[in-house]
Image (cartoon, rainbow, N blue to C red):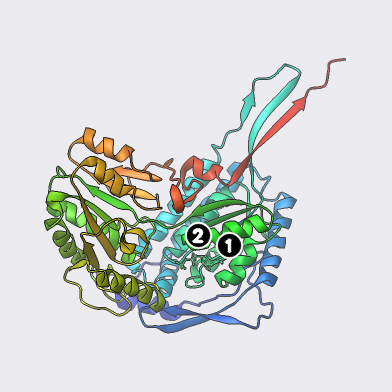
Amino acid sequence: MNQVEPQSLKDWQELFAKTRLDARPFIGNQRSDAPISQFFDVVNPFTDKVLTSAPRCGSVEINAAVATARKAFEDGSWSLMAASKRSEVLCRLADLIEANGPELALLDTIQMGIPVSLAMPDIQLAAKKLREAAAGSERLFGMLLPSSSSCIALNLRVPQGVVGAITPWNFPLFVALGKVGAALATGNCVVLKPSEIAPLACLRLADLATEAGLPSGVLNVVPGLGPEAGRALASHLDVDMLSFTGSTATGRALMQAAAESNLKALHLELGGKSPQVVLDDCGDLAALAQQLADGFMFNGGQLCVAGTRLVLAQELATELPKLIAEKTGAWKFGNPLDPATLLGPLASRLQCERVRRFMSRASQSGFDACTGPHGENKNLPVPTIFTGVPSSAEIFQEEVFGPVAVSSSFDTDTQAIELANGTKFGLVANVWSSDFVRGHAVATKIKAGAVTLNTRTTHEPPRTIDASIEPAGESGFGAEGGIAGLMAFTRARHLLMNLPRPN
Ligand code: ADP
């Protein structure tokens, strides 16, 4: 039965009061009650109160989960099932995600502060993307190769095998489901290690997957800390592929772990410092200012694709940052359980302190700070644009993961491109110009997995079902989304069959 979406703060608080927070690991289609001696706290960043203590799983639980996934993979109950049948199970899971949307959104909200007003559409989008992955997997055609009449030569896409997934806290269920959905749709069995900041919705996903009919052992979810459970998964000798979203520093550690263990295939979606390039012919500044503000304010700037570098034509460099700072006020701060709230606290006190340290170093470097109507809020720094920032500055180069942007200016389009490409990252970029030919010329020279002209990167139309993004530079590698995103969870196999000779 579909849960009714709460309509007020009181309704959401009531749902919170009656929601069971179950952080036990999920291995072999059930919650595990195996004794565990250590726990970690899951904390609500809006209240700083402990929500629950989660089992601090390590190599013992990871080994058990990988063995279960391996057994499930080898028995073929999922990996050899017809793609159309797998697709049916995943579509049932998508229905269950939607039906339980309020609970899943609530779990993300209380753990990492994303307002329910964003978490609800996020969960619906996650279900939609799961259906897309399911549908796409039925179109992963193999090839019949030209060969002599005495044989049949095929090229097929086959699952990687046991896939480890390590995921971040910024959109806990959405990011995890992006990986898990693509991996399952292509016939893999999965061990997911969600972020220690927000493991609950991912664990709940596994309960729902069982309800949808996923065979035992196909999806396992193990809570734990990065250097413990995460590292055990990354170093495991029986994991065939590791898909990760998180920081570039952790991505490097995972490459090392893969190299030192079994050379498992890697899929890394890492940091970003995405440019929003505004040419002098961009048109209506007031409307654009809101879009530019939205680019680094969504989810408190805690998204790898946040448009945190404003690369502005010289004649806009004084006026536009002030306008954008004003527009940050549209993001109303409040209790994330209040449907009227658009901006909650950052995901944790530690994250907030980290962002504030970035900001104070930028201030000490002498950059002017441009702010709007926001004051100080608990666990949320004042949304700020540092202006006139050269590409050599730390705040220009490093991902902050908070409501903080920098602005830099250019005189020529060539300089704009240089600035846009002036970091180690290459995730997304937006270009704004009313001259299509000029805007297109700039957009094509920016190195990023997705470049948009006169729109922000979005999951809604005009995005198409088959759009895939593959990061560049130190933002990682491996496609996400669309057919290429599904192919990333498969490998090529050549199958050559000699035909019996006629007697
Ligand atoms: P953040 O600092 O934003 O949490 P991380 O890259 O540290 O970003 O974390 C993303 C995910 O990576 C989390 O699930 C975390 O537990 C995991 N992780 C962190 N360090 C390691 C590590 N050394 N090995 C494996 N996983 C890790």
Quadrant, the C terminus: top right
Q: Is residue 75 above or below residue 333?
A: above
Left or right of 438, for residue 106: right
Q: Is residue 323 above or below residue 139?
A: below
x and y percentages locating residue 27 in the rendered image = 65, 66
Amino acid at dot 1: Leu
x and y percentages locating residue 172 in the rendered image = 46, 64
10 Å neighbourhood of mark 1: few (<14), some, or many (≥20)? many
Q: Residue furthest right?
A: 503
Amino acid at dot 2: Ala
Determine contact: label 2, label 1, CB under 8 Å. Answer: yes
Q: Nearer the viewer, residue 276 or 488?
A: 276
For mark 1, give the secondary structure: strand
| Disc 1: residue Cβ within 8 A of ligand 1's nearest atom | no
Q: Residue at x 19, y 44 (%)?
A: 279
Residue matched to label 1:
192
Q: Residue at x 14, y 42 (%)?
A: 281
For mark 2, give the secondary structure: helix
**Image quadrant in which you'd find residue 113:** bottom left
Q: Nearer the viewer, residue 431 or 286?
A: 431
10 Å neighbourhood of mark 2: few (<14), some, or many (≥20)? many
x and y percentages locating residue 196 in the rendered image = 51, 72
Q: Nearer the viewer, residue 32 or 436?
A: 436
**Image quadrant in which you'd find residue 333:** bottom left
Instruction: For residue 483, say whether it is visible.
Output: yes
Residue matched to label 2:
176
Left or right of 341, for residue 140: right
Instruction: For residue 97, say whether it is visible.
Output: no
Which numbered disc covers residue 488?
none
